[in-house]
Amino acid sequence: MKERIVNIRNKAGIHCRPSSIILNTIQQKYPLHTFVVEKDGEETELNSILNLISMGLACSDQALLTVSGQDEDKAIAEIGDLFEYEFDFPPK
């Protein structure tokens, strides 16, 4: 199991579109891994977009991302980077 503190940098927080990108990446690249995000003592498994949106992760929030699975280092690096990415919709 690997852990990483992620800092939310997206101005609008982790809303529908960033959640979709994060969950699609997990489903496509890391389907056998278990991802959990925790903020202020509340945690949820990242297995649906609604679970992630319900966390209410806003800009400048910190959360603990945990992963367990076969290639944990690569998985936590890529998914952690998506949490910290400053999305711009539509892309410029």
Image (cartoon, rainbow, N blue to C red):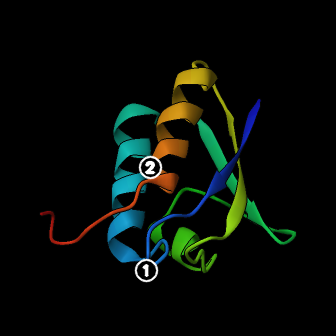
Residue 42 pos. (x, y %): 81, 71
- Tag shown at residue 12: 1
Identity, as a three-letter code, of the amino acid under mark 2: Leu
Mark 1: secondary structure = loop
Residue 80 relative to residue 1: left or right: left
Q: Specify the quadrant of the image occupied by residue 7.
A: bottom right
In the image: residue 27, left or right of residue 81: left
Residue 76, position as x, y percentages in the image: 59, 34
The residue indicated by pointer 2 is: 82
Query: Real-space Cα distance between discs 1 and 2?
Result: 14 Å
Q: Secondary structure at mark 2?
A: helix
Q: Is residue 70 above or below residue 87?
A: above
x 51%, y 55%: residue: 83
Q: What residue lies at 42% left-to-right and 54% top-to-bottom? A: 85
Q: From the viewer's perspective, is 51 left or right of 30?
A: right
Q: Is residue 87 visible?
A: yes
Q: Amino acid at mark 1?
A: Ala
The residue at 70%/63% (across/down) is 62
Relative to 67, say whether 58 is above or below.
below
Residue found 64% across the figure and 52% down from its top: 6
